[in-house]
Amino acid sequence: METKMSAGTWTEKYSKLRSMNLPVTTCKDEDARDRLWISQIADGKETALNELYTAYSQRLYAFAMRLCGDPAQAEDVVQDLLLTVWQDAGRFRGQGRVIAWLLGIVHHTALKTLRRSGKTVSLEQAEDLAGDSPSPEEHSLQSDAHSQIVCGLSNLSREHREVLELVFYQKLSLEETARVLHCPLGTVKSRLSYARNALRGELERSGDRKESGL
């Protein structure tokens, strides 16, 4: 049974994963299904990694795009994520949902990438670059309020945009968001309150506040 995979062979493995169109294991309890995959990955079962990738790759890539604003960097972040999951699945202790753990790895990896490149990205750039990769955010913003929301978000700091992304579009709890961002729960609450108030003002001026769900 293969339990280790070198970084040198990972690019080829990642390319194979991307080309696969595998059925996703069905389970009434999504997190129970995800935990089963993580357990199987820890035992060296590549099929489980394939299924995890099939279930979440688009969502994780979209989040990486929101943070990096560059398709190549987002690809690298997802590739690093898969390698991390393959190597560290046995360290997952079940504290929270698997998707929150995965998003936390994406967040940590993307920020390291941005620090190395010395690059910042505006929300408008991320929206344009992610145009071919639908995400929960893009599906939920199919309304006349979209342009006003984008305008409002562009005036927020990265930290405030991250909280909105994780809570409203990735559907994480406040506690999960705090773990992903490695900050106190109170900080998440204050950032979320500030961001929501800022967007409310934008939407009230456009008359689309009700449609946004904020």
Image (cartoon, rainbow, N blue to C red):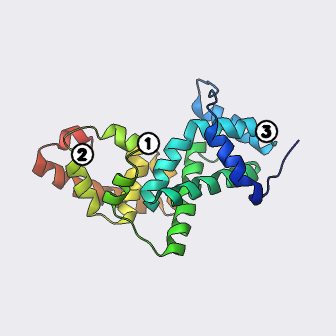
For mark 3, what is the residue?
45
Task: Tell me if mark 2 has few (under 14), some (14-19) or many (20+) residues whose alpha carbon lies within 10 angstroms of its own.
Answer: some
Specify the quadrant that holds the N terminus. Answer: top right
For mark 1, what is the residue?
171
Q: Is residue 189 visible?
A: no
Residue furthest right as drawn: 1
Task: Tell me if mark 1 has few (under 14), some (14-19) or many (20+) residues whose alpha carbon lies within 10 angstroms of its own.
Answer: some
Q: Are marks 1 and 3 in contact (CB under 8 Å)?
A: no
- Give above or below for 30 relative to 180: above
For mark 2, what is the residue?
146
Q: Residue 86: percent from the left, percent from the top?
A: 73, 49
- Location of residue 105 (image quadrant): bottom right
Residue toward you, 62 or 155: 62
Helix, strand or loop for disc 1: loop
Q: CA distance from mark 3 to mark 2?
A: 42 Å
Specify whether 72 is left or right of 153: right
Task: Tell me if mark 3 has few (under 14), some (14-19) or many (20+) residues whose alpha carbon lies within 10 angstroms of its own.
Answer: some
Q: Residue 119: percent from the left, percent from the top?
A: 44, 72
Q: CA distance from mark 2 to mark 1?
A: 19 Å
Identified by mark 1, the residue type is Lys
Q: Are marks 2 and 1 in contact (CB under 8 Å)?
A: no
Residue toward you, 169 or 126: 126
- Circle nearer the N terminus (1, 3): 3
